[in-house]
Amino acid sequence: MVTRAERNASNPDLGVLSGRLLFAVQRELFETLARLGFGDLKHRHGAVLAYLDPEGVRATDLAQLSGQHKQIIGTLIDELEALGYVERQPDPSDRRAKLVRPTGRGLAQMQAADRIMAAMQDRHAERVGEDEYARFKRMLVDITEHQRLAGRPARD
């Protein structure tokens, strides 16, 4: 009988593969960010930082984009605000709402993270070929979105 560990070593399922990829990307990203002076960030902060725009984003939109609950996003925003990466400002289009906007430190982190992620992607595209990498990304986006929709209840 094959154990789960043996199966996941020789024929990993989608969850194991996606987890391995996520953890490896996070490790490289956050270790490199730490060397660049952003060592106070934690992997969990990526749920906000990955979707943050210079113009600002509402917390509800961050929750939807990241797939996290609003309460979790609110806690992460609180942490990032205390660390000096984001600030809450009134949304000019709706004064009842708040935008989460990057501070100067937040913008610097976003630029550094963009460069790190671009270098990672370039490295993989060079290794497997640009066309093959583009095909892989299209398929991964399709599978990811299909899986995200599969877990949602049907709407009438």
Image (cartoon, rainbow, N blue to C red):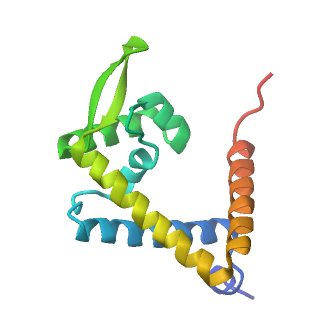
Left or right: 47 as drawn, with respect to 45: right
Residue at image position (46%, 64%) is: 117
Residue at image position (72%, 59%) is: 138
Residue at image position (42%, 58%) is: 114
Residue 11 percent coordinates (x, y): 72, 81
Residue 48 in sight: yes
Quadrant assignment for the N terminus: bottom right
The quadrant in which residue 129 appears is bottom right
Left or right: 23 as drawn, with respect to 127: left
Residue at image position (47%, 37%) is: 62
Residue 79 in sight: no
Residue 108 percent coordinates (x, y): 28, 52
Residue 124 percent coordinates (x, y): 58, 77
Depicted 44 relative to depicted 66: above or below: below
Residue 35 percent coordinates (x, y): 24, 71
The quadrant in which residue 38 appears is bottom left
